[in-house]
């Protein structure tokens, strides 16, 4: 029998995937069992065997990490390997098996609990973050003890071509799984604008998030159809349905191939207006996709990944080397480097305390706020960006601005950085453009002042919508309220464009809205001429741009803005379609 589970779809150019389920466990993998005294030796041997298999497994994962991976995944795996031999974990577990005559899985669980208690009481932030590593390692050994192909280290079995079903995935998980050829993701939690969802879109992995109880309702190994366009996960599809979805996969492949013809074509509307299409980068290796899809530059390089999956912070040289690599890969097209935006759902072990301990991280110490509070995070990055500007066209972009004073502080720090570099005889481009993101309604409503201070503004709709509509972008319970065409959002975008026009400051958009072909006529009608998106959307958006008559869309939008409160999103889109193709 076919069953369908519903969630929220996240799709790039691959709307559908078919593959066998790979369930990642979230609950405990073991329960307490007493064992007879004469089985203790065998239980100890079973533990040793699981430890050996876990070690071999981690070693093999380590060799599979591509050298292009910017994060310290290798370091992270090394730490886990060390724990497999750590006496605090292993010898103590052996003692528990002997003394209490209990099964190995449960002994591990008890030892894990007492270690975690100790870690939780530690003053040292770094050591406290190690408790997650203990959990990962313990679960992995337990998985081998249980002979289950599930582990939450994501380092199990062959994942190629399979649909990973998990309670939740971190951005780092998503990257690791992409490297390992995963076909699709299904998660129980997470909103459509969570960073994991954005990453899945950018990695072009069909994903359905917010599927309640997915790990309970779906079975290990069963064939699933993940329809990221409709947000549905089908289990037990019959052959007729499977044929239908296989054709969908094929036609999406054909569409991608046919769009290739646009790579070298200009991004110009029917009435001759050029529209600049830029790429959003999550990782250095996305440079290739940006170029292959004809991006005229990078409108957003999210640098958070340099800070994730590691214990320490990247130093100036590491930042610098990373940026210079990307500049070289881009071969003369501009790179917009966004300064660190940690907090909310993106965390770094080294700053876990400041960025996660708040009750409402979306309104707390995130992005530029965190950077201004923790100069050791920010200064090496600032210096590296300013230095990298000597190597090619670079723009620096500040995230999550909520006041003009913040911008003045950052501009002061950049001026100071330039003075220091000059004294040190290090090269930089003194004219490197500095821009700010409009992600908070307060920034939108002070766009005039920001525009006078900055060289460009970029509207980050993922956050602008979150903060305007008061919906947590990672909470799937409120994702139904996420509406880019909400009149309040459109008015803020319009306001930013008008306010920035007074000082002739350029405005682009780099939120997910910019890469959604449905919204392109609205954005062009509002006056945007520069859109930045995940590379997989560039050609689809170019196709829409080339079919638009911007003059007609602008006239229609002027009129529609007057009646916005009385229009549904569909009516708005229909009216623009009518204006575009009368
Ligand atoms: C945004 O908020 O729209 C944006 C581009 O930034 P991020 O998604 O990384 O928060
Ligand atoms: Mg943002």
Image: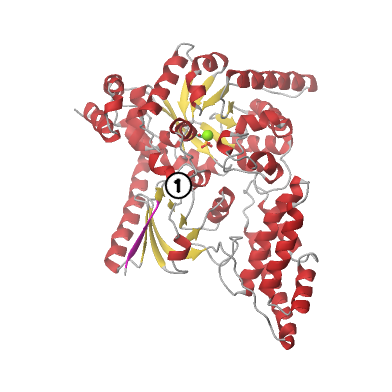
In the depicted view, which residue is nearer to us: 564 or 175? 564
Task: Identify the residue at image location x=44%, y=33%.
Answer: 465
Q: Which residue is drawn at 51% across and 18% down?
A: 446
Residue 399 in view of the camera: yes
Quadrant (top left/top right/bottom left/bottom right) for the C terminus: top left
Q: Residue furthest left?
A: 582
Judge left or right: residue 519 versus residue 432.
Answer: left
Choose between 335 and 436: the one closer to the eye: 436
The residue to which callout 1 is attached is: 476
Task: Residue lying at the far bottom in this picture: please name it.
Answer: 38
Q: Is 283 on the left or on the right of 424, as rendered?
A: left
- Quadrant of residue 525 within the rendered picture: top left
Q: Where is residue 358 in the image (x, y as percent from the top left)?
A: 63, 40
* Observer able to see residue 162: no
Q: Does the magenta stretch include residue 284?
A: no
Q: Where is residue 388 in the image (x, y as percent from the top left)?
A: 66, 29
Percent of width and height locating residue 335: 56, 31
Secondary structure, mark 1, is helix
Task: Report if residue 4 lies within the magenta region.
Answer: yes
Dominant SS in magenta: strand
For residue 414, what is the image quadrant?
A: top right
Name the one closer to the observer, 272 or 132.
132
Q: Determine whether 260 is above or below 492 in the image.
A: below
The magenta segment is: 2-7
Quadrant for the N terminus, please.
Answer: bottom left
The correct choice, above or below, for 84 with respect to 263 in the image is: below
């Amino acid at each position: 029998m076919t069953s369908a589970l519903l969630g929220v779809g996240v799709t790039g150019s691959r709307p559908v995937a078919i593959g066998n389920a790979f369930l990642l466990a979230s609950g405990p993998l073991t329960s307490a069992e007493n064992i007879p005294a004469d089985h203790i030796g065998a239980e100890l041997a079973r533990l040793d065997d699981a430890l050996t298999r876990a070690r071999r497994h981690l070693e093999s994962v380590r060799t599979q990490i591509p050298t292009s991976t910017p994060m310290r995944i290798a370091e992270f795996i090394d730490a886990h390997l060390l724990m497999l031999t750590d006496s605090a974990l292993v010898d103590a577990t052996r003692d528990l098996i002997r003394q209490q005559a209990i099964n190995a899985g449960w002994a591990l669980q008890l030892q894990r609990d007492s270690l975690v208690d100790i870690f939780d009481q530690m003053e040292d932030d770094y050591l406290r973050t190690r408790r997650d590593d203990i959990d990962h390692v313990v679960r992995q050994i337990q998985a081998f003890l249980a002979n289950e192909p599930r582990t939450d280290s994501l380092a199990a079995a062959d994942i190629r071509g399979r649909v990973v079903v998990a309670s939740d995935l971190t951005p780092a998980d998503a990257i690791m799984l992409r490297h390992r050829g995963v076909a699709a993701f299904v998660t129980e939690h997470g909103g459509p604008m969570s960073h994991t969802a954005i990453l899945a879109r950018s990695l072009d992995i069909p994903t359905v998030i917010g599927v309640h109880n997915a790990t309970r309702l779906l079975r290990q190994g069963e064939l699933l159809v993940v329809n990221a366009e409709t947000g549905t996960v089908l289990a037990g599809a019959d052959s007729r349905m499977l044929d239908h979805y296989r054709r969908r996969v094929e036609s999406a492949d054909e569409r991608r191939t046919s769009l290739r013809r646009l790579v070298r074509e200009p991004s110009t509307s029917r009435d001759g207006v050029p529209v600049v299409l830029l790429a959003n980068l999550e990782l250095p290796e996305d440079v290739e996709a940006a170029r292959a899809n004809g991006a005229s530059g990078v409108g957003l390089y999210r640098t958070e990944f340099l800070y994730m999956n590691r214990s320490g912070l990247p130093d100036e040289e590491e930042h610098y080397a990373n940026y210079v690599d990307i500049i070289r890969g881009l071969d003369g097209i501009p790179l917009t480097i966004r300064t660190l935006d940690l907090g909310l759902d993106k965390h770094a072990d080294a700053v876990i305390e400041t960025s996660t301990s708040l009750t409402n991280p979306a309104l707390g110490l995130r992005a530029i706020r965190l950077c201004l509070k923790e100069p050791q995070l920010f200064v090496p990055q600032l210096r590296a960006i300013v230095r990298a500007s000597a190597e090619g066209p670079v723009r620096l972009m500040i995230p999550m601005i909520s006041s003009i004073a913040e911008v003045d502080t950052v501009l002061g720090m950049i001026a100071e950085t330039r003075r220091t570099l000059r004294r040190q005889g290090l090269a930089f481009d003194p004219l490197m453009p500095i821009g700010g993101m409009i992600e908070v309604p307060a920034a939108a409503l002070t766009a005039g002042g920001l525009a006078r201070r900055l060289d460009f503004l970029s509207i980050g709709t993922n956050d602008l919508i979150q903060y305007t509509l008061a919906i947590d972008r990672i909470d799937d319970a409120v994702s139904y309220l996420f509406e880019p065409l909400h009149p309040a959002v459109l008015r803020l975008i319009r306001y930013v464009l008008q306010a920035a026009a007074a000082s002739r400051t350029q405005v682009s958009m780099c939120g997910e809205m910019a890469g959604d072909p449905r919204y392109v006529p609205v954005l062009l009608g509002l006056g945007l001429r520069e859109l930045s998106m995940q590379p997989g959307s560039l050609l689809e958006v170019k196709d829409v741009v080339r079919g638009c008559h911007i003059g007609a869309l602008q006239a229609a939008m002027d009129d529609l803005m007057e009646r916005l409160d009385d229009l549904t999103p569909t009516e708005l889109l229909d009216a623009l379609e009518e204006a575009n193709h009368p």
